[in-house]
Image: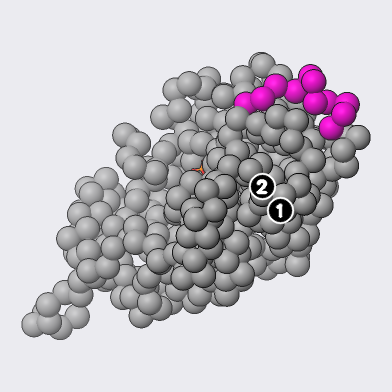
Amino acid sequence: MNRAEPPLRFTGNFTQQEAIPQDAIDAAIAVLQSGRLHRYNVATPDELSETAELEIEYARYQQQRFCLACASGGYAIQLALRAWGLEAGDPVLSNGFTLSPVPGAIRAVGGTPVLVETTKDLVIDLEHLEIMIQQSGARLLLLSHMRGHLVDMEALCTLLEKHGVAMIEDCAHTMGATFNGRKSGSHGVMACFSTQTYKHVNSGEGGFLTSDNDEMMAKAIVLSGSYMLFERHVAAPAVDVFEQIKLTTPNCSGRMDNLRAAILRPQLKALDDNGRRWNERYNAFASQLRQNANAIAIPQRHPDAYEVPSSIQFQIPVLSDEQNTAFLEECAHRGVDLKWFGAEEPKAYTSRYDSWQYIEAVSLPNTDELLRRLYDCRLPLTFSVEDCATIGSIIADVSNDLLSN
Ligand SMILES: *Cc1c(COP(=O)(O)O)cnc(C)c1O
């Protein structure tokens, strides 16, 4: 590098999402003007609320029969676990590398998380999963598609079938993604999505649960706080399915409201196009990192996976403790806001499984080794493709300078 040139700096904001589109704002204003914000508050018996319409549209998008919109992604996971029939003390297999709402949801329902190792491509380790199925006797896997990375879903489904283990998918990072042409979220008995600001669509808070299973979905709808108004759900099982469970299923209110639904409906139309935009940004960033491929490792996508990366992860295994600190500081100094997943103290959204002290302590040496030098960077759509190339080249430069010293 020419010493006379000032080092490249980035000045963008890593947590700035795009504005809510005008048609969504217009739809929100119409809901506010109507005064009917509650999902069951309709003007005439055959009017469909914004929330019911959103559920129809999202079920269609996912190619699933049923959809329930609810208060958050984490809440959707709790509903799914309850609707599946999880009882206090039941073991639930899950990823050792994920975010805290996942073990949190299992604990909220009284389950016992059984954590599974991670491969170098940041997906669940299928060999270790099989061992843990046998050791724990768990009948359920809560699979987190952490950071949007899809494991070989066909190999996974074969393994689960062999052992009679059911799967609930946490698709908080895979809205719009596919495996071998099939939507992420259509491989398990139920799938959960988040519409929180930092995911793929933005209603501030919110979530979806999708399924093809009649009884589980009827339970989930009653659990979510439908009172006896479940007939107002359209992307839902037939009324007679509810008759069997409506008096024995508790109400744990966590509904979505029409205001959020109104701003989400127009955003669904842009989802696939935004997936393409995220991939352009990811590729521009990754191609800069690949210039330093000796030191920087990027997880490899499964060839059958189409992912929608709203963030990028990479490892620099050769960095010493000292170099790691210097790397993070120099990146921050140049305006690049990186999350380090290996930090002792959990900061902001990062977390290591050993910081979840509400679950039994376990040791996952492969996951530890991965997290030790794993970094994460958000890719908001307010960044241009050029911005993403700039950030990638800053990271490549900083790591290069450190390692050539
Ligand atoms: C965000 C997130 C959730 C939960 O979503 P909320 O809407 O914030 O409750 C679940 N799993 C993962 C992996 C997440 O990142």
Q: Position of residue 258 (x, y in %)?
A: 57, 50
Q: Is 250 colored magenta in this rendering?
A: yes
Quadrant location, the N terminus: bottom left
Magenta residues, as a range? 242-252
Left or right of residue 255: residue 23: left
- Residue under label 2: 42
> Image point 61% across, 19% down: which residue?
110
Query: Where residue 104 appears, x then y in whole percent?
Result: 52, 30
Q: Callout 1: few (<14), some (14-19), or many (20+) C-alpha neighbours within 10 Å?
A: some
Quadrant assignment, res 291 = bottom left
- At x 52%, y 22%, the residue is 359
Q: Measured along the vertical axis of the image, is residue 283 above or below residue 178?
A: below
Question: In the rendering, which numbered label is found on residue 48?
Answer: 1
Question: Foreground residue, 289 or 60?
Answer: 60
Helix or strand or loop: what does disc 2 sit on?
loop
- Quadrant location, the C terminus: bottom left
| Element type at mark 1 | loop
Q: Is residue 342 part of the magenta span, yes or no?
A: no
How many numbered circles does the render carry? 2
Q: Is mark 2 within 8 Å of ligand 1?
A: no
Contact flag, marks 2 and 1 (Cβ < 8 Å):
yes
Q: Nearer the viewer, mark 2 or mark 1?
A: 2
Q: Nearer the viewer, residue 386 or 243?
A: 243
Front residue (pair 265, 186): 265
Mark 1 near ligand 1 (CB under 8 Å)?
Answer: no
Q: Earlier in the sequence, mark 2 or mark 1?
A: 2
Name the side, left or right, on which 344 lies relative to 89: left
Task: Farthest residue to the left: give it.
Answer: 4
